[in-house]
Image: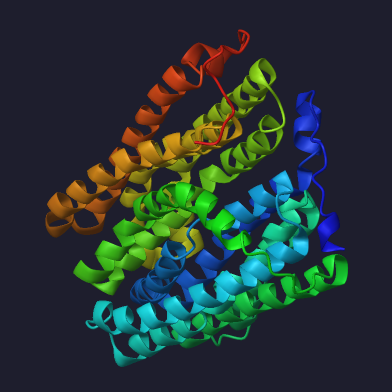
């Protein structure tokens, strides 16, 4: 029964156990990134720079609206199931109710916003934007089944649902590419089909293994909003920092420049595969540990991510011209400089994945919001100053600078409030936790 969703204890010792206990998360993180690279390559080759820019404009606005309306509910589901303050049936009923409200609002807001922000694009692009908006309920609902399993510490099913949409989308694009039937309409339809597939799979797994029933608890929704709203600021700030460059470019530059920038971003973020997985594992293990042991887990994640990022960014800087020209196509050679400019930002962003999860594991998730908020100010001012004059290259410069500011702020906060100074992060040798380092939720 759903009420029997009970968290299982995490592994507590050894780097081998660090990876083994959450192996599916690491594997799926890499698989998701690999699928993202594959779909980026296929869509670029089928659509060309201008078509890839139109695709980015269509997708980024509806997904942005959905992210804004998320309100941290996905994380709140995991937290309250883990704390066992609500049982599975109460949680399923509450999330279904919230999901319906979110879906209604996303469609209404999208139908108002999309015709305006895509006014300079063709009629077909505007129509596809509206189609995407009408399908955002599938995007919203597709992750709630995964959160139910994640809250119950069934990470295997959580990861299966999580990878379902990108896997289905990749299969669709491969079929289109092989059949030489690629077009903007079919690419968008393939992505929407992926969301629907993930939704159907998630509902099937929930019904098959959890079998929730309708069980209303009047305190469930307030509980979810109370927790979720405290981390929504971070979610919005993170999305803003990672996507506002493309949002602004979609309004100010030709589709071709947006397409070139989108490919530069797609390639540069490949270096984040290991830090993202390491951050997830550090949070999952560190949250169940105390003091020195939690910091030791975080230190392992930080040092291993640092080594990976140094090698990956260096290699990608050298290989970017080859990869972009021969993998994405010569039409995207204009992405090379933007990709190289984005790499310093990708480097510090990878380290921030670990520090953000460290703050959550040590009971201070709000610290990440402070770091992202500082970055938002840099991003907003930088885009205003540079994009009108330097286009997508200016956006790349602003992004790298903003990510670096966020990392430096987070590093200072980690040192002062979490006891994670550079010596601890780089060399270990942790001292016992100090009395001020509480694990209460901020």
Is residue 245 left or right of 32 when viewed as pictured? Answer: left
Residue 254 appears at what percent x and percent y?
23, 72
Measured from the top left, where is residue 157 in percent x and y?
78, 59
184 with respect to 437 (left or right): left
- Residue 225, given in percent of the width and then of the height, sits at 52, 57
- 321 relative to 258, above or below: above
Instruction: State whether residue 1 appears in this view.
Output: yes
Q: Quadrant of residue 54?
A: bottom left
**74 horizontally vs 128: left or right:** right
Q: How many marks?
A: 0
Residue at screen point 18% across, 47% down: 381
Estimate the x, y position of residue 92 in percent, counting from the top left. Answer: 70, 67
Write down the quadrant of residue 8 in the picture: top right
Q: In the rendered image, is residue 253 in sight?
A: no
Residue positioned 62% across, 86% down in the render = 179
- Who is closer to the viewer here, 109 or 394? 109
Q: Nearer the viewer, residue 372 or 18?
A: 372
Identity of the residue furthest to the front in this view: 218
């Amino acid at each position: 029964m759903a009420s029997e969703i009970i968290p299982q204890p995490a592994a507590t010792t050894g780097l081998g156990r660090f990876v083994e206990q959450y192996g599916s998360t690491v594997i799926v993180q890499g698989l998701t990134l690999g699928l993202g690279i594959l779909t980026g390559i296929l869509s670029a080759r089928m659509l060309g720079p201008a078509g890839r820019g139109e695709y980015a404009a269509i997708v980024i606005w509806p997904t942005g609206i959905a992210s804004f309306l998320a309100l941290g509910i996905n994380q709140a589901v995991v937290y309250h199931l883990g704390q066992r303050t609500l049982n599975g049936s109460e949680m399923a009923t509450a999330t279904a109710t919230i999901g319906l409200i979110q879906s209604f609002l996303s469609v209404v807001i999208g139908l108002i916003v999309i015709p305006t922000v895509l006014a300079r694009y063709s009629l077909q692009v505007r129509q596809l934007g509206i189609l995407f908006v009408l399908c955002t309920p599938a995007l919203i609902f597709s992750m709630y089944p995964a959160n139910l399993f994640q809250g119950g510490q069934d990470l295997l099913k959580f990861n299966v649902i999580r990878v379902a949409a990108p896997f289905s989308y990749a299969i669709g694009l491969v079929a289109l590419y092989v059949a030489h039937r690629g077009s903007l309409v079919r690419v968008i339809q393939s992505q929407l089909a992926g969301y629907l597939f993930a939704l159907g799979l998630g509902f099937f797994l929930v019904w098959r293994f959890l079998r929730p029933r309708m069980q209303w608890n009047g305190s469930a929704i307030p509980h979810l909003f109370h927790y979720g709203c405290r981390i929504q600021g971070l979610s919005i700030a993170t999305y803003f920092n990672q996507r506002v460059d493309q949002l602004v470019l979609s309004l100010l530059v030709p589709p071709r420049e947006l397409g070139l920038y989108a490919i530069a971003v797609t390639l540069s973020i490949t270096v984040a595969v290991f830090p993202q997985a390491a951050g997830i594992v550090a949070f999952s293990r560190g949250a169940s540990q105390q003091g020195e042991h939690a910091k030791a887990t975080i230190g392992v994640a930080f040092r291993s991510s640092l080594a990976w990022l140094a090698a990956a960014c260096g290699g990608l800087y050298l290989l970017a011209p080859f990869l972009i020209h021969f993998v994405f196509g010569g039409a995207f050679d204009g992405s090379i400089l933007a990709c190289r400019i984005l790499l310093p930002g990708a480097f510090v962003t990878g380290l921030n994945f670990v520090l953000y999860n460290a703050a959550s594991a040590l009971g201070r998730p709000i610290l990440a919001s402070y770091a992202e908020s500082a970055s938002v100010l840099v991003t907003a001012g930088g885009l205003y100053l540079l994009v009108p004059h330097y286009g997508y290259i200016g956006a790349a410069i602003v992004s790298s600078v903003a990510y670096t500011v966020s990392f430096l702020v987070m590093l200072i906060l980690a040192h002062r409030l979490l006891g994670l100074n550079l010596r601890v992060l780089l060399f270990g040798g942790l001292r016992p936790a100090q009395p001020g380092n509480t694990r209460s939720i901020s």
